[in-house]
Image (tube, grey):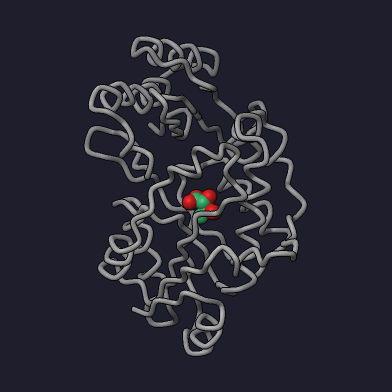
């Protein structure tokens, strides 16, 4: 596995890499990322290379404290990439991605990044930073396919909408959320939960599962509020929305989405709604 720690190294690597399947990450890799990389390696088999990007993107953190404490575990991350079959890892410095004195463009944000009142409202500026860094990496790496996890459901819809417009040559491939055996969605932030908070956090996946059985959207949202409340969790949102636009429910597929702080740790999760029977 090649470790590409600057753009010049990436440019030397790319011509022999074939079609690139890109796995975007901010490091602190867990078993969910590992599954994503394995999928990328399978997609790339026989035609190209799976490249993992590791970069903690400062422009998408609306809370500087969250950025400062974001876990950095590069040696362990490289071991995960290697064992999951990555062909290369691209770990550029901040100055290479955002050269001092040069402004890196932020693409026009699609409506799903600004209108739903979910992550866009809770984390102002977040999707502008995500779109900026994703576009920058797409331009540098020139992937054929990029794999994004479904846990960040709104992010996945934002990137799909942005790519359709700005980089239609890149196929966006979604990957289902990987869960702990008790249902907790895997996240780099789970490591900050105390034992008591981790037990309470299980209410999030439980709320989504119970809501999946509800007969109406209103009932589903009431169930989520109740299940979370029983564990002392006040959600930022616990709603059912159109799965693609994240606007109020329309005729298409629907998704139940929750964001909540458990202690000081902000967690998000989502599930198709209603549950497939
Ligand atoms: O989902 C993430 O880890 C990040 O938002 C991403 C897509 C790597 C951009 O920094």
Q: Nearer the viewer, residue 138 or 157?
A: 138
Identify the residue shown where x is 46% and y is 55%: 26
Answer with the quarter of the image where residue 84 lies. bottom left
Q: Nearer the viewer, residue 141 or 104?
A: 104
In this image, 160 relative to 91: left or right?
right
Identify the residue shown where x is 56% and y is 63%: 94
In this image, 202 relative to 133: left or right?
left
Identify the residue shown where x is 41% and y is 71%: 89
Horizontal and vertical percent for residue 132?
66, 56
Q: From this view, report whether residue 235 is shown above or below residue 270.
A: above
Q: From this view, report whether residue 105 is shown above or below residue 195.
A: below
Horizontal and vertical percent for residue 99?
66, 67
Quarter of the figure that contains the N terminus: bottom left
Identify the residue shown where x is 43% and y is 52%: 175
Q: From this view, report whether residue 264 is shown above or below residue 164.
A: above
Direction right: furthest residue: 108
Horizontal and vertical percent for residue 197?
30, 24
Horizontal and vertical percent for residue 71?
38, 48
């Amino acid at each position: 596995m090649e470790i590409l720690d600057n753009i010049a190294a990436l440019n030397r690597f790319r011509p022999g890499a074939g079609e690139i399947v890109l796995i975007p990450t901010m490091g602190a890799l867990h078993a969910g990322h590992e599954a994503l990389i394995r999928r990328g390696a399978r997609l790339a088999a026989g035609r190209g290379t799976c490249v993992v990007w590791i970069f903690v993107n400062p422009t998408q953190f609306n809370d500087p404290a969250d950025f400062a404490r974001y876990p950095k575990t590069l040696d362990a991350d490289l071991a995960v990439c290697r064992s999951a079959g990555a062909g290369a890892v691209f770990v550029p410095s901040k100055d290479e991605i955002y050269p001092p004195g040069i402004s890196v463009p932020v693409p026009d944000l699609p409506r799903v990044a600004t209108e739903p009142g979910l992550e866009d409202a809770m984390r102002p500026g977040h999707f502008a930073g995500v779109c900026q860094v994703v576009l920058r990496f797409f331009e540098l790496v020139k992937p054929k396919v990029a794999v994004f996890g479904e846990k960040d459901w709104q992010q996945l819809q934002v990137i799909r909408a942005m790519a359709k417009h700005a980089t239609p040559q890149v196929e966006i491939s979604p990957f289902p959320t990987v869960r702990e055996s008790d249902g907790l969605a895997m996240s780099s932030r789970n490591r900050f939960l105390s034992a008591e908070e981790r037990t309470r956090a299980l209410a999030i996946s439980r709320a989504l599962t119970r809501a999946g059985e509800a007969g109406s959207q209103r009932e589903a949202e009431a169930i989520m509020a109740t299940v979370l409340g029983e564990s002392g969790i006040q959600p930022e949102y616990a709603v059912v929305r159109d799965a693609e636009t994240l606007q109020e429910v329309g005729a298409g597929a629907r998704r139940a989405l929750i964001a909540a702080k458990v202690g000081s740790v902000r967690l998000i999760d989502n599930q198709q709604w209603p549950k497939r029977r």
